[in-house]
Amino acid sequence: MISAPMPSAWERARRRVDPEDPVISWAASLGITALAFFLRIIDLSTPQKFEFDETYYAKDAWSLAHFGYVKQYVGDADEKILEGTTTGIWKDDPSLIVHPEVGKWLIALGEKAFGMDPFGWRIAAVVAGSLMVLVMIRLAKRLTGSTLLGCVAGLLLAFDGLAFVLSRMALLDIFMALFMLMAVTSIVIDRDWYRDRLAHLQPEPITDSASWGPIRGLLFRPWLVASGVCWGLAVGTKWTALFPMAAFGVLVWLWSASARRSFGVRHFRLRSALVDGVPAFASIVVLAGIVYTATWTGWLLHADEYESSYSSTQYTRFSGSGHCEDESFVDDNPNNDRWPTQTQKDATGLGEVVQSLRSLVNYHQDVYTFHSHYLSCSEHSYASSPAGWLLINKPVSVAVELDIEPGEQGCTAASDSTCLRQVVLSGTPVIWWVGIGALLYSLAMWIGARDWRFGFISVGALSTWLPWLRYDDRPIFYFYAIAVLPFTVLALTMVIGKLIGPSRGVSRRRTIGVVISGVFLVMALLNFALFWPVFTFDLLTRSEWVDRIWFSRWI
């Protein structure tokens, strides 16, 4: 006879009534979130210029908000916008945008509310970066059962330089990272929901070897639906969210199979693949696809603009500075027969919907060609190998003002030197470098101790980092590692939890763990403070700048 499934010590601890006051827990969470928001919004309009790829996304967002689709713009559009005008800079033809539209729609909300200026196009990123801190706190609390450790995770994320600077820029990566973090948090909540529901539906252990366990009552999993929506928004911001979505989809199945096994189900993996995996696929992948398609509504409503532009001219949209000369690419489809004929464009009703969707598929093929072909023969001075991202191998300078003479703007440099201002996209080194050890520890604990929490962290880190290794032949940038950061922070938090232990009593081991953890947190905070000037475009003398640019590769 099979005995009743015995939960682990961790599960038993989590199922006890939480002794922590939820009001205090949420107050602490919101307090740290407010701190993160305050730090990020300070002097948000500085620098008064487009930083790095803001030059694309800020204008794309404005065009989406005012025309419903992205239009091309004149060559001196940046100068005119910074002078305060948004008229006379837009052309009639649509622009090929090489990333989906969700992040740009969010940037557009800020521009609508505050205007087409640096504050307007950056405020949405501030909100997204601050919300990441809140979600991180609640996720870490759920994983550890401790509000204190949840707050530690939130502070680490709040004081990481990469998350901080991306939260002050109109780039897409911070939005993708937020939606991804929300998606994986929903999956963790679903794990608890599923096991609780399974226990409710199957209060006694299963003794029949032919039994599949409960099925009805587990087909609809609300937190997987929430995750699917978030994954759709994440992929609708950048396609790179597809990799972790696939990895965590498999993890959902494995967690479900493990739960059925604990209740006595035989052949649990195969049976779970059918009764859990298929509904989960619909909740995550199919729903994400629907949400993703819906995020292109603006494009679909203006599909005729793209059809008219791209079916009437030879396909040479990628020609221009930096383009590698490859006629087979430029003339890939000289007759543009993938785009609709005039008869097809005149379709109405359902035919028009089908044709617009077909044109959207063609458009995606063009965008994929851009990423897979055009970028493979491009170069960039700040491109870096993903193999070294966790080491911060090549931070990205996104804004710089050089040769500020002594006496100008408060420059206190010696007469034979100058001052400068710079914004550098770089993580806080202490967090990232110690985080490497924490990630390796997580992998060891997953394999050795079979702790699902460390498995969750390992799958997240690997699925957001390893896929980039196959794209080392094109310019890719360190700040793409923002997707790895949440799992690095969780790994650090879990290690701190192991160091201080679960006991509230005083012991030599616990004292040592508290001291080590405290020293690390203080070092992380001081490291963030040291780099603050190069995160915020503050004035530095040349020698002060050198004190913060630790390696020649960082220049």
Image (tube, rainbow, N blue to C red):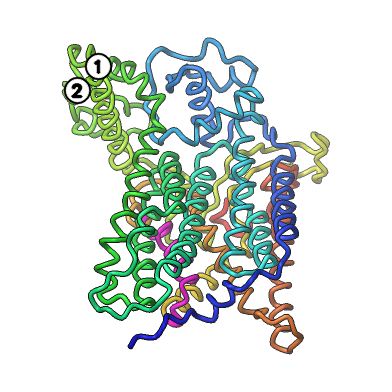
Q: Tell me the residue that label 2 is attached to.
A: 336
Q: Residue at x 42, y 39 (%)?
A: 236
Which quadrant, please, contains the N terminus?
A: bottom left
Amino acid type of the residue that numbered disc 2 sits on in the rendered structure? Asn
Q: Residue at x 26, y 26 (%)?
A: 359
Q: Residue at x 22, y 14 (%)?
A: 347
| Picture layout, residue 482 above or below residue 313 | below
| Picture layout, residue 269 above or below residue 238 | below
Q: Determine if the magenta segment contains residue 453.
A: yes
- The image quadrant of residue 351 is top left
Instruction: Say which of 137 and 333 sits in front.
Output: 137
Lateral position of residue 108 relative to residue 323, left or right: right
Instruction: Say which of 205 and 57 sits in front.
Output: 205
Amino acid type of the residue that numbered disc 1 sits on in the rendered structure? Thr
Separation of residues labelled 1 and 2 (CA atoms)? 8 Å
Lateral position of residue 553 relative to residue 219, left or right: right
Instruction: Say which of 176 and 377 sits in front.
Output: 176
Return the mark for residue 290.
Answer: none
Q: Tell me the residue that label 1 is attached to.
A: 313
Q: Determine if the magenta segment contains residue 66.
A: no
Element on which disc 2 rests: loop
Q: Which residues are magenta?
A: 448-467
Q: Position of residue 256 (x, y in %)?
A: 37, 66
Q: Main secondary structure of the magenta part?
A: helix
Element on which disc 1 rests: loop
Lateral position of residue 254 relative to residue 431, left or right: left
Is label 1 in contact with label 2 (beta carbons under 8 Å)? yes
